[in-house]
Image (cartoon, rainbow, N blue to C red):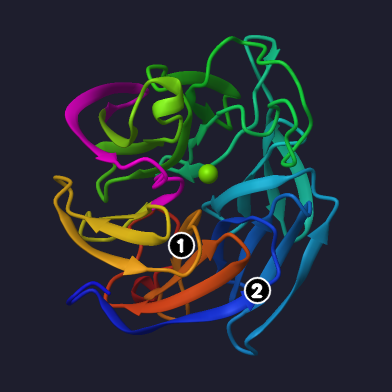
Amino acid sequence: MVEGLTLGQLECLFTGSVWAEGPVWVPGSRTVRWSDIPNNRILEFNAATGTTSEYAVGVEFTNGRTLDADGSVVQCSHGRRRVERDREGTVTGLVDSFRGRRLNSPNDVVVSRDSSIWFTDPPYGILPGTTEGHEGEQEYGGCHVFRFEPVAGTLTAVVTDLVYPNGLAFSPDESVLYVADTAGPRHGVPLRIVAYDVSGSVCRRRKTAVELEDGHAADGLRVDVHGRIWTSAGPAVRVYSPGFELLGTISVPETVSNLCFGGPDGRDLYITATTSLYRIRTTTRDAAAFTFDPTAN
Ligand code: MG
């Protein structure tokens, strides 16, 4: 628990995934939608009824997702090697190639206030023996963070100095982009979250970063309205200040992949962790541009 930031106990809402990841709160249906990646399906937890159902199956191994300006869902597909939009159940591709070569397997995504779509592209969905996509080649020869401008259709590599960029989130004023790198010691780098100063499509790496111990990947992360970073970290969620001071830890019985704020007032933290979906009440909410904000209405 995190003093002053969480209230009550962690609840388990659903168990039955193989690997749960990529949650987002969908205000229109008052549901949490997330990926059960190896089972190739999308699940939804209905906060009003407390029940979980399959939202879609045969989804080409979706992973991370976020909300767009119109409330539709933008999500990553390992299998289609693309970022796509789900507007009330109709799924359309947005971007699948960089300079004529296919993306690796987009993993996580955020939408900024100018409606550009920022996403990470590690190779987890194309690695040999993967159960989270289809084996394939890394065609453009890297693992970048990209910015896609949907109106112009332009794709820009904005971060090219990480090994396996994974979760990502902006600071409340979008001047800083936080990116998790989950490559880890096997690839000669620490598990870490790296901060970049953002100006347009230019990202300048800051000296500040947080390094996590082996086995505690910061897979998915979110930033709250006060700029605090809420990240997965092995069997826990950790909360850091904007300067990466550790503020507290929420212990979770399983390895955490990702998390999102949601609920009727936006202050419930939903956590995907291996087989299960968990929830804990907080005193804050998400800073993301198009997250549900009940105070805005
Ligand atoms: Mg991820």
**Within 10 Å of the Cα at label 1, are there few (<14), some (14-19), or many (20+) other Cα atoms?**
many
Q: Residue under circle 2?
A: 15
Question: With 157 as the anchor, is 240 left or right in this view?
Answer: left
User: Relative to residue 202, is residue 28 depicted above or below?
Assistant: below
Indicate whether residue 186 is drawn in magenta. Answer: no
Tell me the quarter of the picture where residue 180 sits: top left
Nearest the viewer among 13 and 295 is 13
Nearest the viewer among 218 and 22 is 218
Residue in the image at 68% along x and 34% along y: 125
Residue in the image at 17% along x and 77% along y: 4
Nearest the viewer among 180 and 74 is 180
Q: Position of residue 159 (x, y in %)?
A: 40, 22
**Within 10 Å of the Cα at label 2, are there few (<14), some (14-19), or many (20+) other Cα atoms?**
some
Residue in the image at 44% along x and 35% along y: 182
Q: Residue under circle 1?
A: 260
- Amino acid tagged 1: Cys
Magenta residue span: 198-221
Element type where label 1 sits in the image: strand
